[in-house]
Image (cartoon, grey):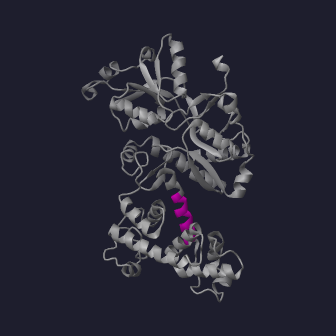
Amino acid sequence: MKQRLALLCILSVTMLYSCKHVDESEKALTTPKVNIDLDSIKKRGYITALVDNNSISYFLYKGQSMGYDYELLQRMAKDLGVKLRLRRISGVENAIKKLNAGEADVLAFPLTITSQRKDYVRFTQPHFNTHQVLVQRKPQGWERLTRDEINAGMIKNPHDLIGKTVHVLNRSSFVDRLRNLSEELGGEIIVVEDSADAQSESLIQKVAMGEIDYTVADQVIASVNLNYYPNLDASTVLSLPQQIAWAVRKNSPQLQSSINTWLTKIKKEATFMVIYNRYYKSPRTSFLRANSRYATINGDRLSPYDPIIKEGAEIVGWDWRLLAAMIYQESRFNPTDQSWAGARGLMQLMPATAQRFGVSNPDDPRQSIRAGVRFLKNLDDYWVKKVADSSQRIKFVMASYNVGLTHITDARKLTIKNQENAGDWGTVEKYLLKKSDPSFYKDPVVIAGYCKCEEPVRYVEEVMSRYEEYKLHIN
């Protein structure tokens, strides 16, 4: 019997993540291949989360990482005392394989909690409740019709779906629900399964554009998309309420317990509803983000200055996404930004540096980027003689750009004096942080003296972290 088959179900944020029948080979992949729980995660210092790129869960908007799940993950990692690493992924089998292979620690998808899924993952406590709804167009000329006339032109009773064609995600829980509904109603609903790469949002758009007549979506996702497509309706409910949660491996009970403790705590704070409302209950901001050229849910642009950034990256020999991450850190892509210390422009050049590299107007994006990358190239020419590894050298260059070359050379001298690896940024930053200690900043090898150098250390860490996130979204 179909009901006796084990189901492997994970809900995509743009669908109630695919539910697929599990054969023995697939079932083997759902067994944890590693034994990594909270103690191991804290020991290594980071937690890895699987996320998906969409208009609610996780995306980039004008270079900034955003999303309901992303914001909660950031706070959760901080509460656990570890750093957050993200892996963007699509596809149910791939996601659960990577979780159980130890390539991630938490599925930060909004998963529906079912008894079958509990055979394969541990659920956190629920985030919220939702249900499946029918997405359809309002009748033509709906703007001039009364509410009763609009309702009369749409399917309001699931029984009226008999004989209708409904497009849904390939092998998804929506397929199962429609087939079960057909049996319950005693008539066939024609179910067309779209490609496995499709998303609920793309099918919702097709309904809005008139390419298909009906689809089924998670009510929470559908309600957000109604803000983009006012000609759509999603008020016809097709399922009972369902609880939405994250998941961890079956053999990670400590992590599950810790996340649950944190969720219980944050749900009592205003922060949780602020985050929830920001992505699920803010029509205007949702619409602006979804229609922005600089949202990764629409394309692969970070800012209006991407072409200039790419030109500049060639000069210094960097991946342009790394330079973009640095510029975002400096100015949030605001060409007229000015710091309290007098640094200006996209690359926050101090007046003397701007003059040195030929800037006549520090607010001009092209001039700022051109001068900034020339300065970076100058720093790279210095460090290439001392740090052979290019990936390590980039961090020395960025730190020098942030706090000045002399402080970084001081830290390197202290590293050499203590007979440690002066070509490794992780080691040198340790001595950079010691430059607020008199026993170190008064050392004869130190030239620049005292420095409260948490800022350059954090600067490098945040730029590199943002760079990794940009690589998730931008090819």
* Residue at x 42%, y 51% (from the top left corner): 300
Q: Is residue 264 above or below residue 444?
A: above
Image quarter where the N terminus lies is: top right
Q: From the viewer's perspective, tell me whether residue 181 is left or right of residue 442.
A: left
Q: Is residue 274 above or below residue 437?
A: above
Residue 173: x %, y % from top left: 55, 27
* Residue at x 48%, y 13% (from the top left corner): 188
Q: Is residue 461 located in the magenta-colored stretch of the structure?
A: yes
Q: Is residue 209 visible?
A: yes
Q: From the viewer's perspective, tell me whether residue 218 is left or right of residue 155.
A: right
Q: From the viewer's perspective, tell me whether residue 16 is left or right of residue 55.
A: right
* Residue at x 55%, y 67% (from the top left corner): 460
- Count the marks: how many? 0
Question: On the image, which quarter does residue 112 sit in?
Answer: top right
Name the magenta segment's main secondary structure: helix
Span colored in magenta? 455-467
Residue 197: x %, y % from top left: 49, 36
Foreground pick, 286 / 388: 388
Q: Is residue 183 above or below residue 378?
A: above
Question: On the image, which quarter does residue 231 sit in?
Answer: top left
